[in-house]
Image (cartoon, rainbow, N blue to C red):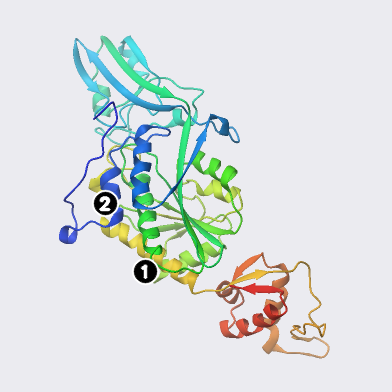
Amino acid sequence: MKNGVFLMMKISVCKLSGGKMSLAYTIISDLWRLPRHFASSGYDEAVAYLKKILPFREIKFTSEDECNGWIIPPKWEVLQALIIKDNKIILDGMKHPLSVVSHSLSFEGNVDLKTLKQHLHYDNRYNDAIPYHFRYSYRPWDRDWGFCVTKNFYESLEDGIYSIKIKTLEDEPELKIIDYRIQGESDYEFLFVAHLDHPGMANDDLSGCAVGCELMNELSKQKTKFSYRLILVQEIIGSQLYLEKIFKNNIIGGVFLEMLGVNINLSMQSSYAETSSMDYFLKKALKEYNCENILEFKSIIGNDELVFESYGIPMPSLIRFPYPEYHCDKDNIDIIEQSKLSEAIAILLKMVEFIEDDIVINKKFKGVMCLSNPNCNLYVDSGQPAFGKNDDNIQMRRVMDYLSIMPETEFLSILCHKFKINKNVVYEYLKKWADHHLIEMI
């Protein structure tokens, strides 16, 4: 430790075949011990490290950037954190980033056992785990001092007077968000999002950040038709500020990458509508890897996808949850498996492959066109009840009608899947629409 900041620890050996670490595993190995609290030097150190991995853009928000009631907490770090009894240190809060409640106030004084226990928090699931207490980071107007301890420690305390020394350093509120964009031939853009906060933990959600970095590193080696962006934020508040201040058009959708390093089967939580292009392509990729555990939106865990959905950006999530070490110090490098990181990356690359091989239909008109007009002659006649139906044209007629009410963008394969019609047949019909500048196909 130096000046109260946990230095990153390089891990040179691990439980890997051949002993070779992937980029994702290396990132987790190097960064998991850092005290990545909101607005902290530990978080800044993680940002500086990742900017050496990929050419991230750094975006800073300050106290002036309050949005929807979300207030950035002060920049914060712990300099000293002790519990002393009978002149003996019984707890040193500097030994793990979770030991002091995130954004705890400074406090120095003597307290009795009852008062002390009002400021101690333990994990009900375990006797020997240090839990993650994060509420003060989201509620900087309602903070107190406190420690996170094991249940064993809590229950071992005896009556008496305890000396408390919590010394923190606070500065002006500051939030750093980083993003990296790969420009494709088209400005249409797909997002990958993960949160970089959570002090001293490996899977939540440093693993999502690491998977995103390796994914983007691989995509950067390719010439892509579409554009892709990785955004690393502080959970909820970072996404809210980013979308309010930085939001751009042309975003088709995104995937939230969450807790992807543990030996738990992959799941997909659908977007809110469950029918977005991102849902379609992620499901398709998962099926290729025999992973078909598809869940409803936010049905087992919720993260920043809610914020993106509130801005009209569909965002399913790729997750491994629940896992028993969640939100405590047992979430460490020992539970991370490189094969699980690699599986998630392979599925995301397969999803991108499906996207790149597809065609986006961009609608250029509003309302309903007179398609029988000889100037375009795009009408599909499926017949009439009185004069006889043309069953061969029924499905194509449904495609014709749908184009008037279709969203601004739609993928060809999704349209064909929706109406169960041959892709080549639909493509030839749409080419005629494109010839009349009613749609653009990318």
Quadrant containing the N terminus in the rendered view: top left
**In-image side of 438 versus 352 (left or right):** right
Kindly tell me whether residue 266 is visible in this rendering. Answer: no
**In-image side of 9 versus 318 (left or right):** left
Few, some or many C-alpha atoms within 10 Å of disc 2 (few <14, some 14-19, many ≥20)? some
**In this view of the protein, which residue sits in the foreground, 314 or 227?**
227
Residue wearing tag 2: 26
Q: Which amino acid does label 1 sit on?
A: Tyr
Label 1 vs 2, first from the N-terminus: 2
The quadrant where residue 293 appears = bottom left
For the residue labelled by badge 2, is the local secondary structure a helix, a strand or a loop? helix
Q: What residue type is labelled 2?
A: Thr
Q: Where 420 sits versus 292, above or below?
A: below
Quadrant containing the C terminus in the rendered view: bottom right
Could you tell me which residue is drawn at 29 percent across and 26 percent down? 4
Kindly tell me whether residue 387 is visible in this rendering. Answer: yes
Mark whose residue sits in front, 1 or 2: 2
Percent position of residue 433, x then y: 70, 79
Q: Where 261 sits versus 59, above or below?
A: below
Could you tell me which residue is drawn at 26 percent across and 26 percent down? 94
Percent position of residue 25, x then y: 27, 53
Whole-angstrom CA distance, mark 1 to mark 2, is 24 Å
Q: Where 440 sits versus 164, above or below?
A: below
The quadrant where residue 48 appears = top left
**In-image side of 314 versus 27 (left or right):** right
Residue wearing tag 1: 289
Percent position of residue 271, x then y: 53, 56
**In this view of the protein, which residue sits in the foreground, 90 or 68?**
68
Could you tell me which residue is drawn at 31 percent across and 54 percent down? 24
Could you tell me which residue is drawn at 34 percent across and 51 percent down? 53
